[in-house]
Image: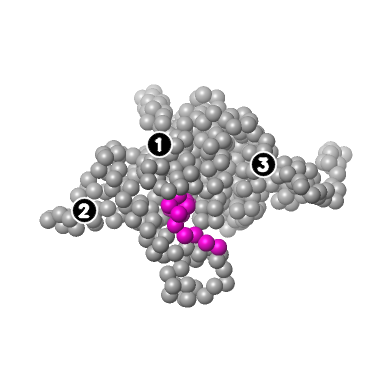
């Protein structure tokens, strides 16, 4: 035969035991099975490889994971040095802050009457209940207050990225929150982990900051909007700074890895860094060396969320199709915590790369390299 079809290890009945650790569950059970159990084991092992090789690791986080407590495991990953930068939705950053300020978020019922919930100011995210007044409106006021204070302290330069904005917001949370240790934004700010939110306007944080010029206008005689009252993170700075993290790692021979929780804008924003370098700036970049995506999205409907990692090869997003990537088709609230827990049991803490404190320098480094390409 051309191939040895029987090289794989034999499958046996699941060897469950009382008191099994996460490592034993992954290595002794999932890894000996098939389907998505085996893919999850492969993901755990690949994430460990990223960490052990000191890769620059990006976490992308789609949807609304923080309302169900996912922020706690992300904090552990940040504190352990396992995550170097983050791309997420505004929803995750917004709901993350509830826990720092002790605002109510409770388990609910996905079969509840939504008309009745609305009458009682209860907001539902599937089976999670959030209080409109005590949580959402209270959170909006906190974000406004922290952002206004940052403006008064002249914290914002003329051009800045969403990573800069969230670093500043995180600093405010560290100063004012009752329990800042419950916020991954605060932890990211403390450990210099950049948090990019490329769809900044598509969230309650964007909604809240849009109110700032209205407040300023209401207090003036002219009733005209003043550009100085706007807080406008620059999409261009987001693109350049994220590409700079990848470029800096690449020229320093540091492998690059990603754990994509869900898909959406965060997934694409990360994966466009290599095409930005190669296709736009003329700096050859092979893409992410390692990619894990935990998703339930299908590849055959044309959405980026369901696109396979291997498809990214044709776009220049990965070095080689079929190598260094895996997709467990699982609910992210199940798959991601198991991957995180496996890493905590099997990987030593790493020294943080602290990209947040050097973003201006490495971005300038990229700009100079790109200018050199133009001038050739």
Residue numbers of the magenta segment? 92-107
Q: Reply above or below: 79 against 94.
A: above
Residue 202 x %, y %: 40, 55
Q: Residue furthest toward the left? A: 221
Coordinates of residue 91 in the picture (x, y in percent): 45, 54
What distance separates the C-alpha of mark 1 from that of mark 2? 31 Å
Relative to 113, residue 36 above or below: above
Q: Earlier in the sequence, mark 1 or mark 2?
A: 2
* Residue situated in front as seen by the camera: 195 or 171: 171
Q: Which class describes the residues within 10 Å of circle 1: few (<14), some (14-19), or many (20+)?
A: many
Horizontal side of 143 relative to 264 (left or right) equals left
The residue mark sitting in front, 1 or 2, is 2
Which residue, given by chain and number where applicable, does mark 1 sit on?
240
- Please say whether residue 148 is one of the residues in the magenta stretch: no
Q: Which residue is mark 3?
A: 342
Which element carries disc 1, helix, strand or loop? Answer: helix
Q: Quadrant of residue 21?
A: top right
């Amino acid at each position: 035969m051309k191939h040895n079809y029987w090289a794989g290890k034999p499958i046996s009945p699941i060897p469950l035991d009382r008191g099994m650790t996460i490592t034993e569950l992954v290595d002794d059970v999932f890894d000996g099975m098939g389907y998505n159990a085996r893919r999850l084991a492969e993901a755990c092992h690949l994430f460990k490889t990223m960490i052990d090789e000191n890769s620059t690791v990006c976490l992308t986080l789609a949807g609304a994971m923080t309302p169900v407590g996912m922020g706690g495991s992300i904090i552990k990953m940040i504190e352990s040095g396992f995550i170097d930068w983050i791309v997420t939705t505004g929803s995750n950053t917004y709901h993350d802050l509830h826990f720092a300020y002790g605002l109510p978020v409770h388990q609910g019922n996905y079969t509840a009457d939504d008309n009745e919930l609305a009458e009682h100011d209860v907001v539902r995210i599937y089976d999670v209940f959030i209080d409109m007044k005590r949580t959402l409106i209270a959170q909006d006021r906190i974000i406004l207050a922290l952002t206004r204070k940052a403006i008064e302290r002249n914290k914002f330069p003329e051009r800045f990225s969403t990573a800069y904005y969230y670093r500043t917001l995180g600093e405010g949370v560290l100063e004012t929150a009752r329990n800042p240790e419950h916020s991954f934004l605060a932890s990211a700010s403390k450990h210099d982990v950049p948090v990019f939110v490329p769809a900044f306007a598509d969230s309650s944080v964007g909604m809240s900051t849009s109110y700032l010029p209205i407040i300023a206008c209401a207090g003036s005689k002219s009733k005209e909007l003043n550009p100085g009252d706007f807080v406008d993170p620059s999409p261009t700075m987001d693109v350049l700074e994220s590409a700079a993290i990848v470029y800096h790692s690449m020229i320093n021979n540091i492998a690059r890895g990603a754990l994509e929780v869900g898909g959406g804008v965060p997934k694409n924003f990360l994966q466009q860094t290599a095409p930005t370098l190669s296709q736009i700036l003329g700096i050859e970049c092979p893409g992410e060396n390692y990619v894990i995506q935990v998703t339930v999205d299908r590849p055959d409907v044309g959405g980026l969320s369901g696109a396979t990692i291997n498809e990214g090869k044709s776009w220049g997003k990965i070095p080689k199709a079929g190598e260094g990537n895996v997709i467990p088709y699982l609910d992210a609230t199940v798959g991601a915590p198991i991957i995180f827990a496996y890493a905590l049991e099997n990987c030593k803490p790493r020294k943080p790369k602290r990209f947040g404190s050097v973003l201006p320098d490495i971005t300038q480094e990229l700009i100079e390299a790109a200018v050199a390409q133009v001038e050739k």
